[in-house]
Image (tube, rainbow, N blue to C red):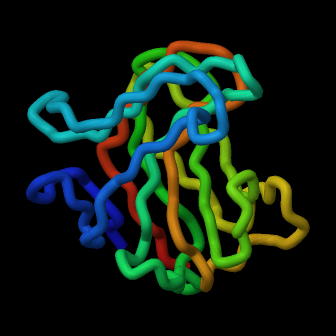
Amino acid sequence: MLIDDFSGPEGRSTLGADWEVFSDRVMGGRSDVQVGYRQVDGVNVLFLRGRVRLDNNGGFIQTRLPLNERGRDFDASEFRAVRIEVRAVKPGAYYLHLRTADTRRPWAYYRARLNVTDEWSSLELPLGEFEPRNLDRPLDPSRLRSLAIVAYGEAFDADIEVRRIELIAH
């Protein structure tokens, strides 16, 4: 199931929601972030770039997509993985974060590391392997709320491009 290939009008995802942007500035950090679209080899891609800074307990930038524009749960229980086509224009610590109805606190989420290079790659991230952070329950795919591309945890100049995100069925 296609989540987004960035071909939609006015930047809307295939699901009908808009990508949102956040940084550690919401909690006093000092990281800078830019999110947008650019053409690469004739194809629209989403980019996340900026400077991740650790000052003031900061350390992240992200772009997040609500999976249901009404804020309700998105049932992904019939899917086994997220597939993402991605490349890092600049190296760094990149992740895919999932949030559910169980991740009420801003610092609670499920994450998978994006092992990317400067070459395009298609990564398949099994839902059962997303690591819970700051919560003690495994991911319940029937209660997804959002997914996010995140640069996190170390000071670096981030620049990552995504050209497709989809859910892969069992």
Residue 133: x %, y % from top left: 80, 54
| Front in this rendered view, residue 132 or 123 | 132
Q: Residue at x 43, y 28 (%)?
A: 33
**Position of 108 compared to 40: left or right?**
right
Q: Quadrant of residue 139?
A: bottom right
Residue 106: x %, y % from top left: 68, 55
| Front in this rendered view, residue 39 or 52 | 52
Single out the residue that lies furthest toward the front: 28
**Position of 19 compared to 143: left or right?**
left
**Position of 46 compared to 58: left or right?**
left
The quadrant in which the N terminus is found is bottom left
Count the marks: how many? 0
Q: Quadrant of residue 129?
A: bottom right
Residue 151: x %, y % from top left: 57, 32
In this rendering, the answer to whether 2 lies above or below 27 is below
Q: Residue at x 32, y 67 (%)?
A: 2
Q: Residue at x 46, y 78 (%)?
A: 71
| Front in this rendered view, residue 34 or 7 | 34
